[in-house]
Image (cartoon, grey):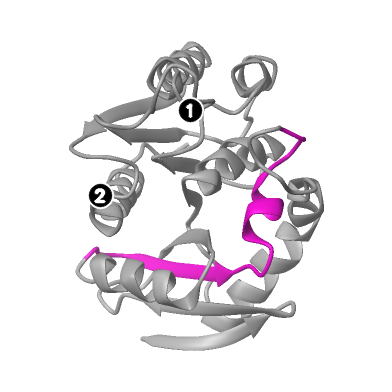
Amino acid sequence: MEFISEINGKTALIYKSNDASDHALLLMFCFSMDEAKEFVQCLRGVSGICFVAIVLERWDACMIPWASKAVKAVPEAGRLSEEIPILLEEIARLCKTTFRKRYLLGYSLGGLFAVFEAAHGRFDGLASVSGSMWYPDLVQYVQSHDYPMVRGAYFSIGDREGGKPSSPFFEVREKTLSIVSAFKEKGISTAFELNEGNHFFQAPLRVRKAAEWLANTPKK
C-alpha cells in the first residue's frame, strides 16, 4: 500500500508493506517529495514496515535544535518536536495500525534531528545516516540525556565525508564515533557502519541498510 496524504498540514508519502499483520513505523523527514519517493522505492521488500516520509518546507531550520554558524537558519527543531505526538497519532489513524515499534530515521541534518528528538522518549530506536554529528555541542547533548525508550541506534557515514580541516564538517567521523560510544555506554544496542563514498553517494541504499537494522533491534 502506498499513498500521499496530509498530516497536520504537512504532505506525507506513506508506504506500508503487505507481508505482516503488525508493522513497525519508520518515520523520516525529507526536504522534497522526490527524495521521499526515492527512499520508498529502495525500501520495497523490507518486511513488516510502515514508512512515512514527511516533507518539510523549512527542512534545514526544522532539523537544527540550536544555532550554528554553519547553518544559516533559525532553529525550529524544538517546535517540530512538540508536533511529534500529533504526527504519530495522525499516522496511526491514517494507517489504521497500532505500531509494535516506532523508529525515527534521518539523513544529513535529519540524522541530527533524530538524535535530538529520540531523547524525548517517543521512539524505540533511531538511525542517523550520513548524519550531521559534527554539529556543535551534539556529543555533550547525547552524553547528558538518558534516551529512555531507545533500544537500538544505528549510525553510518561515508568514508569520504568530512571535508577540509577548515570545514565545520571535518570531525564528523570522530564525533560520530564519540556519539556511538555514548549510546553503547547507556546500554543501548548500537551499530556503526562506514559506507563507501561522499555525503551524497547511494543515499537510498544507506537508508535501506538502516531500516533493515532497526527492524531487527531487540525488543524491550
Residue 154 x, y percent position in the rendering: 38, 35
Question: Mark 2, residues whose alpha carbon is within 10 Å: few (<14), some, or many (≥20)?
Answer: some
The foreground one among 127 and 131 is 131
Q: Quadrant of residue 55?
A: bottom right
Magenta stretch?
46-68
- Kindly identify which numbered label has been placed on residue 201: 2
- The CA distance from mark 1 to mark 2 is 16 Å
Which image quarter holds the N terminus? Answer: bottom left
Q: Is residue 116 above or below residue 72?
A: above
Q: Amino acid at mark 2?
A: Phe
Residue 72 x, y percent position in the rendering: 71, 45
User: Secondary structure under badge 2?
Assistant: loop
- Kindly identify which numbered label has been placed on residue 169: 1
Left or right of 41 on screen, residue 107: right
Q: Is residue 143 visible?
A: yes
The residue depicted at 54 percent of the width and 35 percent of the height is: 150
| Residue 62 is one of the magenta-drawn residues | yes
Q: Is residue 61 above or below residue 116?
A: below
The residue depicted at 62 percent of the width and 15 percent of the height is: 143
Q: Is residue 96 visible?
A: no
